[in-house]
Image: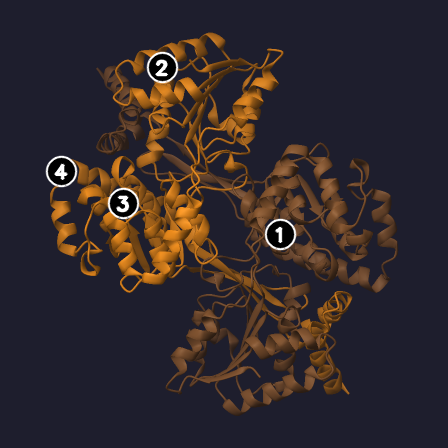
Chain colours: A orange, B brown
Amino acid sequence: MPVFLDTAAADFEAQFSALLSAKREDSPDVDDAVAAIIADVKARGDAAVIELTAKFDRLDLTPETLAFTSEEIDAACEQISREDRAALELAAERIRAYHVRQMPEGAQWTDPEGATLGWRWTPVSAAGLYVPGGLASYPSSVLMNAIPAQVAGVERLVICAPTPDGKSNPLVLMAARLSGVETVYRIGGAQAIAAMAHGTETIAPVDKITGPGNAFVAAAKRRVFGKVGIDMIAGPSEILVIADRDNDPDWVAIDLLSQAEHDESAQSILVTDDAAFGRAVAEAVEARLKTLGRRAIAGASWRDFGAVITVRDLAEAAALSNRVAPEHLELCVADPEALMPKITHAGAIFMGQWTPEAIGDYIGGPNHVLPTARSARFSSGLSVYDFIKRTTLARMTPEALKAIGPAAERLAMSESLEAHGLSIRARLDRLNEDAT
Amino acid sequence: MPVFLDTAAADFEAQFSALLSAKREDSPDVDDAVAAIIADVKARGDAAVIELTAKFDRLDLTPETLAFTSEEIDAACEQISREDRAALELAAERIRAYHVRQMPEGAQWTDPEGATLGWRWTPVSAAGLYVPGGLASYPSSVLMNAIPAQVAGVERLVICAPTPDGKSNPLVLMAARLSGVETVYRIGGAQAIAAMAHGTETIAPVDKITGPGNAFVAAAKRRVFGKVGIDMIAGPSEILVIADRDNDPDWVAIDLLSQAEHDESAQSILVTDDAAFGRAVAEAVEARLKTLGRRAIAGASWRDFGAVITVRDLAEAAALSNRVAPEHLELCVADPEALMPKITHAGAIFMGQWTPEAIGDYIGGPNHVLPTARSARFSSGLSVYDFIKRTTLARMTPEALKAIGPAAERLAMSESLEAHGLSIRARLDRLNEDAT
């Protein structure tokens, strides 16, 4: 059973705080093992990667077979049904259209003192995407990671996707092809992250690494951060649904389960202004759990981390949601546009009952890589911004330097940075000489 | 002596690679000590912070004296000369004007299928800025960190600034006041980062921590990352100057020294298409080093990490600069606007001989917190983007769901995520029923 909370109850605050701080994930401490793997790949390159792949993925590779060949990818793509291919193409097209609109523009202007100021955006040169193997090998994640990089103008885009026992997912390879990926390496784990960060004889280093992964991958990304850029460290997924009584309890129940089925550590929370509706949704969840394929996972998640919270009104619902800062937020209310401005922290908002969260996982257009574990308080989902960076621009004229230089010189001297001050003073002196 | 390289030399590539990979910083391994400090602050709150401050800063505090009072800040501001105050105010005004232009706008549109898509930007609720004590206590850094947060709309902005032996910098306090900081705590080190991330009885937790610091502060920021957002982990500073012969060698020399004087690990590189000009600059550096106040630091940096590189032409200079990805880049050339588009990786560009880098440290307007250690390949300087986050928006109509839902359902099923598929199918079935 999930917890049932009511903001009108005396102990609500204590119970809600407990829900907020519940530890949903055991992070095994793999840091020493990961440090050793990274050092090994740095020292021995391909040889280390190949040995580690034999050990962890039971797959024998050579430098020549580290990457899929173009023919292998062709062959994989031919296995895919016409319908699956069309679905993947439509998803790619819609994700691309959304992210193209995200590309920001540079700016340049001249201020009253005559200083020209501004900034430029430029793409990262090379990016590496990690795609987990096995059950969590999702073609949709390939699109969501690679397309923003492609839209940003990244020149070289590679994927590392382990193929345990040699098994690969044709849809992953097709998604890679649809999104401009140059090379797909069949390696995974910390060794793949190390190879992309430091490079090997065969694998050229990249500048930015994104994509989800297990504890080894997460620890490796943390360690190579600084040498390369990384996206977020993803935690277990969560959804919060704010629903009024004018919803089909079954729809809301399935939406909650669509998060719960990801992972036993996932969290699904319903916030409603109608206690009876809340109970009806909980019953609908139980009914759906009887037949759902992934009922063991979804049931454990709902039992351990699920919650149904009754609130006085929708404003209170928004305030609670902001404290959760959920990765996914559904506003299943009559007027979602009116409620939306009250939401200050959420990864993605799905508005109205015709917008199940799953539409955003695949085909809506916005990215499905979103901040988890309350990090929407300070971070955003994946986007073109992850693959570009900003260079600031400044150009002084002699007049501008005369106008603002003396203040800079004074501040430099107050910080005891004499050469900073002198670099301005030498120029101002020349201007004064020239004037006399 | 700095190294002298020439792209025409046979061993240039080897020497340049060595320069690029030179390890400039010893990072002492303080991670275990920092982990213990964070655990202590988490467990014992104020008491731990107070004990650690007594130990490291030789300063006895109570929960009541952890923060400067408004009267203490008033008194500090009154010690400041009219000229210093005016300089700080002009800097704050110009930094604010630049960052106001950075604020991006949200977007919302409806696509041909009837799906409404878009995103909103919202500020982080609370941010904490770290300001080092002692020699590196720079009021300009307070402005550069706090003003972007203020412009972004951060509600609560606090500073932690250690005051070893009780010594504080009045200009730091004034800069805090000029940039909307609510509270300045006189604590530092890993204990300050822990207090801001986890909160204590007196110090409410924040969502984002920025600002430079020593090895303890850097290790603590790395550890609390995830619980809160952090900015970059700053390394030693660097400048690269691309200069043609039509420059005053002395000006370029001082510009190089203005970076070198920060830190013995700082790096200053001159790239010129005129070998004689390069030698003249090196001589001018030696001359300036005779009298410069911080000659011990600047001299060591120039000797150990300085470089003068002669290139065939400016295009080659740009290509080398891109491989360095310098934090600061001066284009002291006749037509900097023409060279600028060739620059693909740099934290900040200073264009033309009238724009010494120091102008950007204080008063130009752009931020002086910039990516170091070649990280301009994948990251940007501090900006309003560090204090806002993006929530994506999606709203389907029944028609839009009919148009794109089936493809999402298919992809969900191909990933064995049944509930994802069902959440769309249940709605599509209703639409089909309604239609019949």
Name the kind of residue labelled 4 in the image. Answer: Ser
Give me the C-alpha separation between circle 1 and circle 3: 36 Å
Report whether residue A49 is seen. Answer: yes
Tell us which disc is closer to us: 1 or 3. Answer: 3
Give me the C-alpha separation between circle 1 and circle 4: 56 Å
Question: On the image, numbered disc 2 is attached to which residue?
Answer: A285
Give me the C-alpha separation between circle 2 and circle 1: 49 Å
**Sequence-wise first label, 4 or 3:** 3
Residue B216 has which mark? 1
Q: Quadrant of the C terminus of chain A?
A: bottom right
Q: Is residue A31 left or right of residue B356?
A: left
Residue A326 position (above or below residue A219): above
Confirm or deny contact between disc 1 and disc 3 (CB under 8 A).
no
* Residues flagged by tags 4 and 3 on a common chain: yes
Confirm or deny contact between disc 2 and disc 3 (CB under 8 A).
no
Tell us which disc is closer to us: 1 or 4. Answer: 1
Tell us which disc is closer to us: 4 or 2. Answer: 2
**Sequence-wise first label, 2 or 3:** 3
Determine crowd level at label 1: few under 14, some 14-19, many 20+ residues with C-alpha closer than 10 A: many
- The percent coordinates of residue B77 (x first, y second) are 84, 53
Residue B242 position (above or below residue B341): below
Looking at the picture, tell me which residue is in the foreground, A224 or B157: A224
**Chain on which label 2 sits:** A
Q: Residue furthest top?
A: A276
Q: Quadrant of residue B193?
A: top right
